[in-house]
Image: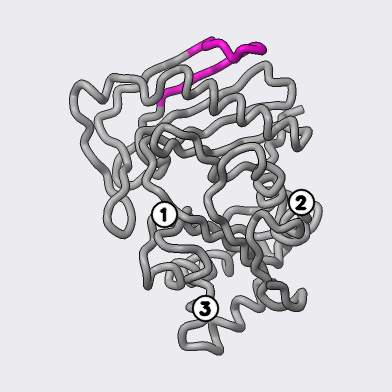
Amino acid sequence: MTRGADEVQWLPVTDERCGDDRFAGPGVRALHHAVDLATVPETVVLTAPLAHWQDLARRRPAPFAEYASLVEEPVSLRAWQIRPRAADVPVGPVFVNLVPGTVAEGMLELLALAEDGPPEFPRLAFALQRFTAPEATVLTQAAPDGERVRAQAFLGLAEQLSEPLYPDLIVLTGRRLAVHEYRVADKPTATMTADGGSHTEKIAELRRRAPVLRVKALQEIGALAVAVARRLGMPVTAEFSVVEGKPVLLSCRPREVPS
C-alpha cells in the first residue's frame, strides 16, 4: 500500500520501493537487496515525515493501532530517522517479542524519542519484523573482499538489560574463512526471551564457558555477511539470529570505514 509522500507508506521489505534510500534509508535498502541471499523474517516498513506521525498522535485516540497487526505477532520493532543521501539515525532501543496490545505503545514511545532527535532528519520510519526466539544472536562486520569477518556471538539476544552482555569474539580470515581468533567469554548471564519481552537469565556453570556457536555455524554466517557486502559493493554490519540451528538475517546496513 502506498499513499501520498506526506502520509504513511507501508511496504514489505521485499517491495522494490524499499531499494530506494529516499523511502526508508540505506539500512532498509541493504536488507531489501539481501532478501534473496539469506532468510529474512517477515518485515514491513512504515515511513512518513515526522510531522505526520506527530499529527496522527495528536488527532487519534489510538493513532497507530491500524499498523500493529501488519506482521503476525510477536514482533520486533525498531525506528530510525532519515535524510536523503545521508546515513540514517537509529531511534531508541529495538523492542523485541512484542505481543498484542504493545506494538502501538512501542511506536508511540519511539516517536517521543524521535521528537528529540536531529531536526535535519525530518522523516521517521518503523520496521515491524516477525520475532522468533533465537538460540543465539551474531553481529558481524564484513567487506566485499571477504578477507576478514569480525563477529560477536551472544547467547540468546544481543540486548543489554540490567546485566552486561558477554559475547564471544571471533575473527575469520581468508577465502575459507578460517578461524584467526576465537575468544570465548565467561557468560554468567544472558538475555533470553520471556513472555512479552526479554529477561536476564543465569547461565549454568558448564554452559557459561562453552562457545556460543560451533565454528561451522559461524563460517556459514560469515559467508552470508560477505555475500551481502558483495551484493551492495561496500562493507556492512549485519545482525543474524540462529533459530533451530539456521541463520536468519534480521538487519544489515552499510558500514563506514575510517579513512
Q: Are marks 1 and 3 in contact (CB under 8 Å)?
A: no
Q: Is residue 181 above or below residue 116?
A: above
Q: Is residue 152 above or below residue 106?
A: above
Q: Nearer the viewer, mark 2 or mark 1?
A: 1
Residue ID for mark 3:
66
**Where the C terminus falls, by quadrant?**
top right
Rendered image quadrant of residue 225: top right
**Position of residue 107 measured from the top left corner of the image (x, y, whole percent):** 49, 68
Q: Residue at x 61, y 30 (%)?
A: 224
- According to the picture, the residue beneath numbered tag 1 turns out to be 96
Q: Which residues are magenta?
A: 168-181
Residue type highlighted by circle 2? Ala
Q: Provide residue 28's location: percent of width, then percent of height.
A: 67, 52
- Residue furthest out toward the left: 205
| Between 72 and 171, the one nearer to me in the picture | 72
Q: Which residue is mark 2?
A: 86
Q: Is residue 101 magenta?
A: no
- Closer to the N terminus: mark 2 or mark 1? 2
Q: Earlier in the sequence, mark 2 or mark 3?
A: 3
- Residue 247 rendering spot, x and y as whole percentages: 49, 35
Q: Quadrant of residue 250?
A: top right
